[in-house]
């Protein structure tokens, strides 16, 4: 049986540090992934090839990070039927990431890109896991465990907070 796979792609290797947060999430959930540069502007032929072969290569979801004009997530969504999660990246040529965010989130009808916060690759990873968990009960159980751990963290924070400020 083929393992679930996700593609984590980015417009430049300078985006790797941000996008590695998505990779860490997928590793945490035991999801096989690939991590590669696919530039919409500098290597459009490679981008077309990647999109054309993604499903045949076993990918189920694509997480695409891009800064500046940020065309990569939208182009991926235009070229494949796989779900695409866009990660706007605050890059050296962006306007605090706002240009990237708007480029990714403002897609035309019939070309949706699920979009997370600027530099929000961690949440892109979680969203990819949630998408994959629709048809994978083991992943679903791991997500339930994560939600329960988060609930316990909040309870612990409240206990510490009450002790710090001496509340009843």
Image: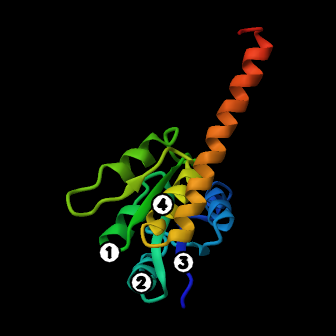
Q: Which residue is mark 1?
A: 81
Q: Which residue is mark 4?
A: 130
Identify the image quadrant of the N terminus: bottom right
Image vertical order of residue 35 relative to residue 112, above or below: below
3 and 4 marks in contact (CB < 8 Å): no
What is the distance, in whole Å, between disc 2 and disc 3 at their CAs? 10 Å
Q: Which residue is mark 2?
A: 55
Identify the image quadrant of the C terminus: top right
4 and 1 marks in contact (CB < 8 Å): no
Q: Which residue is mark 3?
A: 5
Sequence order check, earlier mark of 4 and 1: 1
Please say whether residue 119 is visible from this viewpoint. yes
- Of residue 132 and residue 136, the one placed in the foreground of this image is 136
Mark carried by residue 56: none
What is the distance, in whole Å, between disc 1 and disc 3 at their CAs? 15 Å
Sequence order check, earlier mark of 1 and 3: 3
What is the distance, in whole Å, between disc 1 and disc 2 at their CAs? 8 Å
Residue positioned most to the front = 168
Of badges 4 and 1, nearer the viewer stands: 4
Sequence order check, earlier mark of 4 and 2: 2
1 and 2 marks in contact (CB < 8 Å): yes
């Amino acid at each position: 049986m083929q393992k679930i796979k996700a593609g984590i792609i980015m417009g430049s290797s300078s985006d790797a540090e941000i996008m590695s947060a998505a990779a860490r999430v997928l590793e945490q959930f035991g999801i096989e992934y690939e991590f590669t540069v696919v530039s919409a502007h500098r290597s459009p032929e490679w981008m077309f090839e990647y999109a054309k072969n993604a499903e045949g290569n076993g990918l189920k979801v694509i997480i695409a990070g891009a800064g500046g004009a940020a065309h990569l997530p939208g182009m991926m969504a235009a070229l494949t039927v796989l779900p695409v999660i866009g990660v706007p990246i605050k890059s050296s040529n962006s306007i605090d990431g706002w240009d990237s965010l708007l480029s990714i989130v403002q897609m035309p009808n019939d070309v949706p890109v699920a979009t997370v916060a600027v530099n929000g690759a961690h949440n892109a990873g979680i969203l990819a896991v949630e998408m994959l968990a629709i048809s994978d009960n083991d992943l679903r159980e791991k997500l339930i465990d994560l939600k329960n751990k988060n609930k316990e963290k909040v309870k612990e924070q409240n206990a510490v907070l009450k002790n710090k400020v001496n509340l009843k």
